[in-house]
Image (cartoon, rainbow, N blue to C red):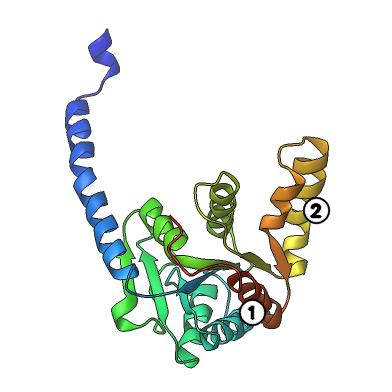
Amino acid sequence: MRQELHPKGWNEIKTNDSWAIFKIMGEFVSGFEKMSKIGPCVTIFGSARTKPDNIYYLLAEKIAKRIVESGYGVITGGGPGIMEAGNKGAHLGGGTSVGLNIELPFEQHDNPYIDSDKNLDFDYFFVRKVMFVKYSQGFVVMPGGFGTLDELFEAITLIQTHKIEKFPIILVGTEFWKGLIDWIKATLLKEFGNISEKDLELINLVDTEDEVINILDSFYKESDFSPNF
């Protein structure tokens, strides 16, 4: 009976899992070696589906240009939409433009505004997310979908639980984010008590590029640039 519960090839799957460790390790080693040489950067997140004439695409481009003019580089997920806008703004500003690409069945393809020597490819989401968190001095989060929310809440959780050092998390677009912030305050905080009042201080909500730069500059007057763990 017990053998019937395990389909043929089960042991082969477990063996393949073991060998996958070396591929995962290789992605980490390659990522660490390349990202450690890039210097202080801010990551811009947002939807891959955002079109170039969208107000948030144009705003992300402006924000990225201002970020590199302030002395930071820009990291994105390397794809189209908001990611492209971030790399485009960095490129137009003459600054460092990094893309952390991942192979997906739809939407994802690298954009033309990434520095040729800073275009990294990943097979594993979790390895890619480590690179974002470790080498970013701040997250600028534009309107996006599930992937954007995943990256946002992972960073908040890691900072909340003191697994990484605190860095600015900036949500751009009051109209887009207000419903989520209201739910966090009303449901997570007040109704259920699942977070503390202090946790709300981890998030900044803004609408302009000036506000983004002011938050970054104010934070780094008191803190050093360094990898986050």
Viewed as shown, does residue 178 lie left or right of 46? right
| Residue 32 point in image, percent of width and height | 30, 62
Specify the label residue 53 is tagged with. none
The residue carrying mark 1 is: 213
Amino acid, disc 2:
Asp
Q: Quadrant of residue 195?
A: top right
Please give the name of the residue rendered at 25% of the width and 58% of the height, measured from the top-left corner.
29
Q: Closest to the observer: 1 or 127?
A: 127
Do we see residue 47 in this rendering?
no
Mark 2 crowd level (few <14, some 14–19, many ≥20, 10 Å Cα):
few
Question: Would you place residue 7 above or below residue 158 in this image?
Answer: above
Pair 2/1: label in front: 1
Q: Closest to the observer: 42 or 187?
A: 42
SS state under label 2: helix
Amino acid, disc 1:
Ile
Viewed as shown, does residue 88 lie left or right of 143? left
Chain-order first, disc 2 or disc 1: 2
Specify the label residue 182 is tagged with. 2
Q: Quadrant of residue 138?
A: bottom right
Please give the name of the residue rendered at 57% of the width and 47% of the height, measured from the top-left corner.
157
Mark 1 crowd level (few <14, some 14–19, many ≥20, 10 Å Cα):
some
